[in-house]
Image: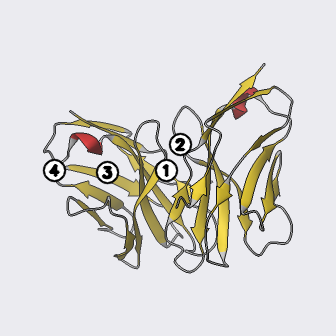
């Protein structure tokens, strides 16, 4: 089974609108961390936001928020007030608590912001 | 802001040649990683390194691959005899802890095997 599933290969959003990028995960480890990374066309991987499995509140970082639904095993990224510079690939990733060494990445979602 | 640096940014090599990719992790980080991303595909884990030894490796990381930290600052990935399918972007990453906190990635080294 895939550890991280991103079902949206491509998404479009109008500038200044909000967009949700979906991510579901699979683990039996009670302790884990969920991450979102942005990969612009230049190729680098930029950390956006982190959610720990024991965190009670959804993580937020500026225009990014993580809609964490533990029972559904989903960790969707919400980008508010989209900007042209948000156009990029977005990867959801998970690190399991007991091993911790390996990050599992999803296949990514390509986001295009339309002016 | 401290960052992970990687060299070279792009390397072209002939099949069968040895390649060394270099990385300088963030100085106070303890855990080091190599990932690769074949063009248009997802990021795949290769190996993690802690306390001067490999702590975990994937099936991709076979006998053709090796890592070392020769001088306390550099972290290298060596591919002994490159194959066409080794063409990919190779990312070095580091983290403070193995249990919490994000991975900090370098900008990647693009390897093209001809």
- Provide the secondary structure element on which disc 4 rests: loop
Q: Quick check: can you spot residue B96?
A: yes
Of the two numbered discs 1 and 4 in the rendering, the one whose residue sits closer to the viewer: 4
| Left or right relative to A83: residue B25 | left
| Left or right relative to A91: residue B4 | left
Q: Disc 4 sits on a residue from what chain?
A: B
Dot 4, how many residues are within 10 Å of its Cα: few (below 14), some (14-19), or many (20+)? Answer: some
Q: Which quadrant of the structure image shows residue B110?
A: top left
Separation of marks 3 and 4 at Cα, in angstroms: 13 Å
Q: Disc 2 sits on a residue from what chain?
A: A
On-image quarter of the C terminus of chain A: top right
Q: Residue at x 32, y 58 (%)?
A: B60
**Residue B81's disc number:** 4
The residue pinned by badge 1 equals B106
Image x and y of residue B63, in percent: 20, 63
**Residue A44's disc number:** 2
Q: Residue at x 53, y 63 (%)?
A: A103
Dot 1, how many residues are within 10 Å of its Cα: few (below 14), some (14-19), or many (20+)? Answer: many
């Amino acid at each position: 089974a895939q550890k991280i599933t991103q079902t949206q290969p491509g998404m479009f959003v109008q500038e200044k609108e909000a967009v949700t990028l979906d991510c579901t995960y699979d683990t039996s480890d009670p302790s884990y961390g969920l991450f979102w990374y942005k990969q612009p066309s230049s190729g680098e991987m930029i950390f956006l936001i982190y959610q720990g499995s024991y965190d009670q509140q959804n993580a937020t970082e500026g225009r990014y928020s993580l809609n964490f639904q533990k029972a559904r095993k989903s960790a969707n990224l919400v980008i508010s007030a989209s900007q042209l510079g948000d156009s990029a690939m977005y990867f959801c990733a998970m690190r399991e608590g007991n091993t911790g060494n390996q990050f599992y990445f999803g296949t990514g979602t390509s986001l295009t912001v339309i002016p | 802001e401290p960052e992970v640096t990687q060299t070279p940014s792009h390397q072209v090599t002939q099949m069968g040649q040895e390649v060394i990719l270099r990385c300088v992790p963030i100085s106070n980080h303890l855990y080091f990683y190599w990932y690769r991303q074949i063009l248009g595909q997802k990021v795949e884990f290769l190996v993690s390194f802690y306390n001067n030894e490999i702590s975990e490796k994937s099936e991709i990381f076979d006998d053709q691959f090796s890592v070392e930290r020769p001088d306390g600052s550099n972290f290298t990935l060596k591919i002994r005899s490159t194959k066409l399918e080794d063409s990919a972007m190779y990312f070095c990453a580091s983290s403070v802890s193995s249990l919490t906190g994000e991975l900090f990635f370098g900008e990647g080294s693009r390897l093209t095997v001809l």
